[in-house]
Image (cartoon, helix red, strand yellow):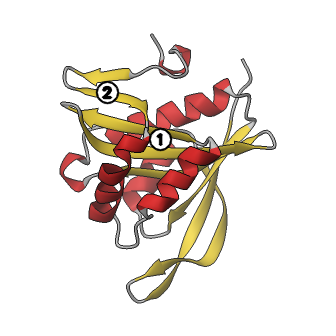
Amino acid sequence: MALAQQPRRGARQLTDDSALRPMTVADLKQVAANEAAAFPFPWSERTFADCLAAGDECWVATVGGTVIGHGVLSEGAGEAQLLNVCVTPAEQGRGHGRALAERLIAEARANAAAAVFLEVRASNRVAMTLYADLGFREIGRRPNYYRAATGREDALVMGLPLKRR
């Protein structure tokens, strides 16, 4: 079954011991810990709680029942914004980030968004390659958007038009 055809709120099995499922309040401590392990300027647990409370699409990737990654998508005005995709460093490179991004894109499509947008650090070549593989194209740049170890860093703005089914 193709990802976009799967039930909206159901878990998705990735391998024998990994899956995707909607994030819950009980996941917040581990999500924040994973975020802190992966990023020098992480979102706080409170930020993730706010996303859940706002009704954003918040998903986690698990391996053996342990949360190893997460993603957040905000929707409104016929568009979607991919706000966060993160996989703990020990699990990176195994397809979990791609699976999370695909799940969130599928949610945007299911909710009739015309496009998905995101910002990505100009230095994050791995993420830019993933997003390009998923069909995103660079549409702009936000100078000095992100905090960086030595000041500020530009964000590339990428967009993905969604075909209506």
Cα–Cα gap, marks 2 and 1 = 22 Å
Residue 6 lies, in percent from the top left, at: 50, 15
Residue furthest right as drawn: 77
Q: Amino acid at mark 1?
A: Asp
Where 94 falls versus 148 (above or below)? above
In this rendered view, identify the residue nearer to me: 50 or 82. 50
At a point 26% along the width and 45% down the height, the residue shown is 93
Q: What residue do we see at 56% from left, 50% from top? A: 51
Side (left or right) of 9 relative to 74:
left
Residue placed at 38% from the left, 21% from the top?
12
User: In the drawing, does residue 93 fall left or right of residue 116?
Assistant: left
Residue 19 tag number: 2
Q: Quadrant of the C terminus?
A: top right
- Outermost residue on the bottom side: it is 150
Q: Which structural element holds mark 2?
A: strand
User: Could you tell me residue 41's position as x and y percent?
Assistant: 40, 72
Can the viewer see residue 87 in this picture?
no
**Residue kind at label 2, given as amino acid type:** Ala
Marked residue nearer the N-terminal end (2 or 1): 2
Pointer 1 residue: 133
